[in-house]
Structures are given as structure tokens and as C-alpha cells.
Image (spheres, coloured by chain):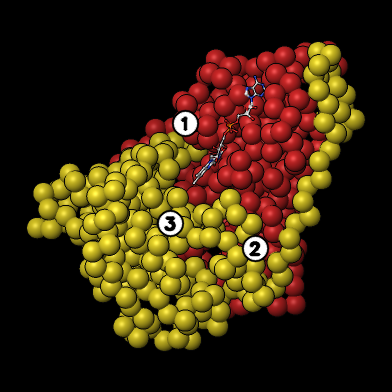
Chain colours: A red, B yellow
Amino acid sequence: MAEILVLVDHADGAVRKPALELLTLARRLGEPSAVVLGAGEATASVAATAAEYGAATVYVADGAEFAEQLVVPKVDALTQIAKEKEVAAVLVTSSGEGKEIAARVALRLGSGLITDAVDLEAGAEGPVATQSVFAASYTTKSRVSHGVPVITVKPNSTAPEAAPAAGKVEDVTVAFTGNAAKVVSRTARVSTGRPELTESAIVVSGGRGVGAAEGFEVVEKLADSLGAAVGASRAAVDAGWYPHSNQVGQTGKQVSPQLYVAAGISGAIQHRAGMQTSKTIVAVNKDPEAPIFDLVDYGVVGDLFEVLPQLTEEIGSR
Amino acid sequence: MTLRIAVCVKYVPDATGDRGFADDLTVDRDEVDGLLSELDEYAVEQALRISEEADEAEVTVVTVGPDDAKDALRKALSMGADKAVHVNDEAIHGSDVIATSAILAKALEKTGFDLVVCGMASTDGTMGVLPALLAERLSLPAATLLSEVSVEDGVVKGRRDGDAATELLEAPLPAVVSVTDQSGEARYPSFKGIMAAKKKPVEELELDDLDIDEDEVGLAGSWTLVESADARPARTQGTIVTNEDGDGGKQLAAFLASQKFI
Ligand SMILES: Cc1cc2nc3c(=O)[nH]c(=O)nc-3n(C[C@H](O)[C@H](O)[C@H](O)COP(=O)(O)OP(=O)(O)OC[C@H]3O[C@@H](n4cnc5c(N)ncnc54)[C@H](O)[C@@H]3O)c2cc1C
Ligand SMILES: Nc1ncnc2c1ncn2[C@@H]1O[C@H](COP(=O)(O)O)[C@@H](O)[C@H]1O
């Protein structure tokens, strides 16, 4: 069966959920094999998780290079494995880093590249990728017409399903090419304990209507009652009320949760670009004319400082 | 020595317009007005700031695009860039990002540079991969998605605020960088800048000037194929209620319960 190479993203010794989604999607195209790079002591457990989600083979490589140099060592590893094993496709998670890795691998393999797929299916001439473009106003279907398809897939594109496979571990000695920017220092972000924005099933976002950094408390309380991640509009981020890493939109994160709650957000096109593919959209806004109401499944015209706390209380009492 | 900075800028359809596809499934560039990609204004701004810090520097803006892309170059020149390069050729129409990177890499080599500055992504394609592809083609280090950037003693340094960590990055020149919209507000062109821009040189290049074969680019030379593009049915507005009776939160809770979210 065709071998589908999946780069397994991991953090703090654990496999990130989007990697499990990739392995699940890869099974539609052929037999998945996983690539685990720079996981250090967690390598064995990361490999085991990959096997649980369908990886017949797990290629592993470790080394200081993966942390000390930007992107390129991973490109070296992935390209080398893809060539040696003559794989049928390469799948990478759509993140800033993932997209750069995929692009460079595609160039080295002489392959076409598709980024930000939201779905994948097997086709007569190779994988067919569904993309959502122009702030989700169009849906396109594309395929790679030259070389080994290299495709990046957005988080939350499918629900991960376990499907235990052999997961035979194969050590790979990577020939590093160098020519990368050096990572001089890395300061880990302090975890909030909330779910990752792009991976969360529910996202509650606040905008300029929240009025101040302190105002985000009502947003966070609602998020916590729903087990949700917290997002913010650029207006709220630019005002310094919430970190940029939580920004939803064209220049922030693109999220596609089951439920998106927009509080005090007007719904500018650049914000919509980051949330319009959410399954269910709910908004709370004082202004009945706010464009966000055009896309909602349910909207409340009202003050978020009244509506959100009442909702949080209702959830708590259920 | 003069620090030669090249800025890659893209001319894109206005995101607030009604963007769509032409019959050949390429981006329709006729229906919607175009402009300098807003995210590339940040690249121009950082290039100008770096040049102002340097003893001697020259900023060249480079674009691959149709006739109208000249508007994007003019805007960058009026912000303060010194000169421009416009690669424009019928055969380029329909090029994907891999093909575009081949053209841009050749144009940069011809222009000469010590530092290439790109935006974080184009606002139409939003792939954010071109800077990495340029680095790959030019065999240069790339420090991408920087929210802060500076050049000191032949080394470019920057800060990248990633999801999991903040990283400080470094690369010796020549190098490629891309900057985010967190890197600092772009300046507005002054009246003087706009007048001066009219006299600044814009070099026109065709594929022949870059020794690129027509069949390497355009729709034919692209390694991806768009099979279909369908307008997504507009989301239909659902139920809108008001909080006039002070029970908006409760009504919302009932809706969420009906959808099994709570
Ligand atoms: C190149 C570019 C990239 C961009 N990228 C992004 C991006 O990634 N993400 C993004 O979000 N934006 C982005 N923007 C900005 C975008 O255009 C909007 O400016 C921004 O989304 C507005 O944020 P907002 O909705 O919070 O603020 P506003 O548009 O000011 O809306 C605030 C809303 O809050 C409501 N409100 C006020 N008080 C209350 C209250 N007490 N209760 C309830 N409602 C209240 C108001 O009625 C209003 O509708 C980008 C812009 C550009 C040019
Ligand atoms: N046609 C082009 N001409 C010049 N620069 C470009 C072009 N396309 C992309 N770029 C540059 O590459 C960056 C990332 O583009 P992209 O990978 O298309 O999202 C942009 O912000 C620009 O700096």
C-alpha cells in the first residue's frame, strides 16, 4: 500500500492533537508512517502514540540541531526519508513552521505544494485537498500535478480516531545541510491551562467591546465554564488587552471549532477570515447592525457584561 | 559599504472587495481593485528603519505581477524606498507559489542584495511560504515571522513570538527575513514622498531578462491544479434575540443546550 509520510508535531513530550488528525486523514490515502524529530527522551512515547493512531512505521531522529536551528533540520530529515522510502505523499500540520517545512520539502522533492487544506480524500490522480479561500467565501478542490504531493492540513479538519498499527521504529541518521537561522534563545510561554486556540472544540473571543484588559475576565469565565480556549480580535490585541498569540483572524490564528462565541466583536472581514468556517457561531453585541450578526446561528443584541455572566451562571447551574 | 536591502511586495486584490475566481480558476484580478498588500507595508517599513540605522543603505522594492502592480511599487517608493524592480510578463499569469519563487529568486539575484525582507503572508493567497522558498532557492538562512528585527555587524537579529515560545534568532548576511504585523506600524507616504516617488527608477524585467523559460511558469509550469472553486453558500442569519428583558444570557444558554454544547 502507498506510504503516506506524516510529520508528527509534539510539544512538552506529548503528541499535538493536529498530528493525530493527520494520521487519521492519512489512512484514507494509504498506509501512514510517522516522522518524529527532536523529541529527546519523549521519543518512545511519542512514537507509541503515533502507532496507536495508525503509523505502521515510525521514523525517528534526534539531535541538538532540531532545537538550535530554525526549520531546516526538519526539512533535511523529511526530504531524506521521503526520497529513500519513495513515499506517495507528505502531510504536515498547517502552522507557521509547518508550512515553511512543507514548502521547502516540496521544492527539494520537485513537487507541488498545497497549504491549509481543511479536508483530504483519495482521488484517481492522487490526494484531493479541499481549501477554504478568500476569508472562507470560496471552497476549492485542488491536487498536486507534479511530483510527490506535499500538503499541509489545518488543525480541527477531522476528529482523530485511534487505529492501532505496528509502529515499527526505524532510526534515521540525518545528513544536515546547515544554512539555517540560529535559535539563540527560547523562552517557553507560560501555560494558561486552557486548551490550545487552534485545537479547541469551543472558542470564546472578545473584541474592542470588552473595553479593557480587566474586561476579559467575563470572557475567560465563560470560556472556563465551557472548557473553551480564549480568542481576541486584533482591536483587543492592539489595545494591549490580550496577547497576540490569542488573536483570531487573517494575521492571527485561523480557528475552526464546533462553537465560536464572539463577544464585542464587529465582524470585520479580516476577523471573519479566521473564524468563518466554525460549525456554529454565536455573537453578543450591543449594535444590532454589527456585521457579525450576518453569520451567526444565534445572536444576542445586548451588553456583553450582562449577557456573558448570566450565561456563565446558567451553565454552572446545569 | 552600502547595505543593499530588497523588499518583496505583492499587489493583491482588496480584501474588502468581492474577491473571486476567473474562468481559468486563477484569482480574478479585474473585478476588484488592487493595492499593495497591507502585510507588505510592514516589510517596507522595517526595511526603511534598518536603512535609517545603517551608515549607508539602499532599499529596492521588487514585485512579480501584472501592469497594475506598478501601483504597489509606487506606494512603497512614496513611503521612502529608493528604487523598484517590476517583473512583468504575460507568461507569468497563473503561476503558483513555487513558480513565483523561481522568478523572484532570479530577479533578486539580478538586482543584488545583502538582506531580503518579506511580509508574513500575502493577503490573497495567505500561504506565508514564499520567504522560505526564496531562502531555499538562494541557499540562504531565513529568519521568518519576526516581530522585531535589526541588523548589526553583518548579522540580522530578530524576535519571533511563536505559540509555544518566544525565540531570538540570528543569521549572518546575506539572509532572508519576513516580518509580522506586530513589527511596527507602517508610515504613511508624505506629500513630498509621493512627489519624489514619481521620479524614482522602476526597472522593468521580462522572463527573457532572467533566463527563465516560459514553460517553467504560469498555469502550465505550476505543479498544482485547482479542479473546482465554488462560492460558499453565504451563512444564513440564524435567530437574533435582544436582551431588553434582561434574559439574553438565559436564552443563549437554552440555545447552546439545544445544540448539546452544554
Ligand atoms: C492587514 C490587516 C489584517 C488584519 N488582521 C486581523 C486579524 O487577524 N484579526 C482581527 O480580529 N482583525 C484583523 N484586522 C482588523 C480588522 O479590520 C478590524 O479592525 C478588527 O477586527 C476590529 O476588532 P473588533 O471587532 O474587536 O472592534 P470593533 O470593530 O471596534 O467592534 C467592536 C464591537 O463591539 C461592540 N460593543 C462595544 N461595547 C459592547 C458591549 N459592552 N457589549 C457588547 N458589544 C459591545 C460594538 O458594537 C462593535 O460592534 C486586520 C486588519 C488589516 C488591515
Ligand atoms: N508576486 C510577488 N511579488 C513579490 N513578492 C511576493 C509575491 N508574492 C509573495 N511575495 C512576498 O512573499 C510574502 C509571502 O507571500 P505568500 O507566501 O504568497 O503568502 C509576501 O508578504 C511578499 O513579501
Q: Quadrant of residue B197?
A: bottom left
Up the image or down, B255 lies above or below A63; here it is: above
- Residue A132 or residue A166, whichever sits in front: A132
For mark 2, what is the residue?
Answer: B20
Q: Circle 3 sits on which residue?
A: B36
In the displayed structure image, the side of residue A225 where residue B93 appears, left or right:
left
**What residue do we see at 86% from left, 28% from top?**
B255
Same chain for mark 3 and mark 2? The answer is yes
Position of residue B210 relative to residue B156, above or below, is below
2 or 1: mark nearer the eye: 2
Q: SS class of the residue under badge 2?
A: loop
A233 relative position to A310: left or right: left
Quadrant field for ligand 1: top right
Q: Measure the alpha-carbon separation of dots 2 and 1.
A: 30 Å
Three-letter code, disc 2 = Gly
> Residue A262: which disc?
none
Helix, strand, or loop for circle 3?
strand
* Image quadrant assignment for residue B116: bottom left
